[in-house]
Image (cartoon, rainbow, N blue to C red):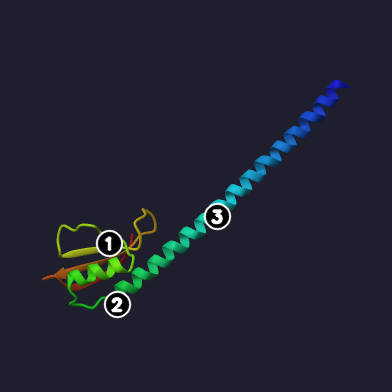
Amino acid sequence: MIKKIISKVTNKQIHKSSLHNLTVFIILLSVMAILSLTYYRYIQNHTEKLQNFCNNIIFGEQYNKIYELAKNQDLAVPFFTKSTNKLIIYNHTGPLFKVSCDIKFSDKRVYSVKLISR
């Protein structure tokens, strides 16, 4: 009889524990889904910004003007560049889902623009 009571109590505790674990799992899954959707929207917004920026570059525009425009539009602009012949501007600084606008210059003026998914 005591074994039956202990068995019933133990089964109820296991059931409560399982429900608690399931609840925690569902909460974590929900939080991850919200964070993923937020990150996706952030990436999408910055990618659209970069596409618009890249499509509106005027050939012959000066290097300094392009650099400043990109910085002012909250795009990922490198802090330093080794040359003024090429400038790569990214949609964001994170490692995933990068898109870049590769701009080539001749005499510090734009002569080539490419939008590249990396």
Residue placed at 23% from the left, 78% from the top? 58
- Specify which label sits upstream in the sequence, 2 or 1: 2
Where 93 sits versus 113, above or below? above
Quarter of the image for the C terminus: give it: bottom left
Any mark on residue 77, and which? Answer: 1
Label 1, residues with CA under 10 Å away: few <14, some 14-19, many ≥20 = many
Judged left or right of residue 103, residue 99 is right
Q: Measuring from the top left, give residue 88's x and y in whole percent.
A: 25, 63
Q: Which amino acid, by three-letter code, is at mark 1?
A: Val
Residue placed at 62% from the left, 45% from the top? 25
Q: Which amino acid, by three-letter code, is at mark 2?
A: Asn
Judged left or right of residue 81, residue 30 is right
Q: Measuring from the top left, give residue 49's x and y in whole percent.
A: 37, 70
Any mark on residue 33, and which? Answer: 3
Judged by depth in the image, the label closer to the viewer, 1 or 3, is 1
Q: CA distance from mark 1 to mark 3?
A: 29 Å
Label 2, residues with CA under 10 Å away: few <14, some 14-19, many ≥20 = few
The front one of 80 and 2 is 80
Q: Which residue is mark 2?
A: 56
Judged by depth in the image, the label closer to the viewer, 2 or 1, is 1
